Image (cartoon, grey):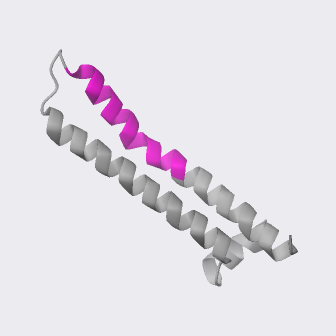
């Protein structure tokens, strides 16, 4: 696993690992853009839209988990590619 980590940072990652990383980054950007659009659309927090602001806060935190899972998946794909599977 450590060799795969070195390969991803210092060398050229395998195409499946690079594909996973790109999709994870794109998904994170879409989630953040959706949170921003909801924030602009709803305006200031009131008693009527507090549930939407809680959703926005959750959407704001979600990309961190997505990127973590994406990075772990890319590492697994990289190590599987190096083993020849």
Residue drawn at (21%, 39%) of the image: 39
Residue 16 in picture, x, y percent from top left: 66, 70
> In the figure, residue 56 lies in which quadrant?
top left
Q: Which residues are magenta?
A: 49-66
Residue 39's place in the image compared with 31, above or below, is above
x then y, percent, for residue 2: 77, 68
Is residue 46 toward the left or the right of residue 59 in the image? left
Question: Seen from this angle, which residue lies furthest top?
Answer: 47
Residue found at x 45% / y 48%: 63
What percent of the width, then of the height, locates residue 67? 53, 54
The x and y percentages for residue 15 are 65, 76
The residue lying at 78 percent from left, 73 percent from top is 81
- The magenta stretch spans residue 62: yes
Left or right of residue 36: residue 23: right
Q: For residue 60: magenta?
A: yes
Q: Residue at x 86, y 70 (%)?
A: 85
In this view, which residue lies farthest toward the bottom?
A: 11
* 50 vs 17: above or below: above
Prevailing SS of the magenta stretch: helix
- How many numbered marks have been drawn onto this rendered protein structure? 0
């Amino acid at each position: 696993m450590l060799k795969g980590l070195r390969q991803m940072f210092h060398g050229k990652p395998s195409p499946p690992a690079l594909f996973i990383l790109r999709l994870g980054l794109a998904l994170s950007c879409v989630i953040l853009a959706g949170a921003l659009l909801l924030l602009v659309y709803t305006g200031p927090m009131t008693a009527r839209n507090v549930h939407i602001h809680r959703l926005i806060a959750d959407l704001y935190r979600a990309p961190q988990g997505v990127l973590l899972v994406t990075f772990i998946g890319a590492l697994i794909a990289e190590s599987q590619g190096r083993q020849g599977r």
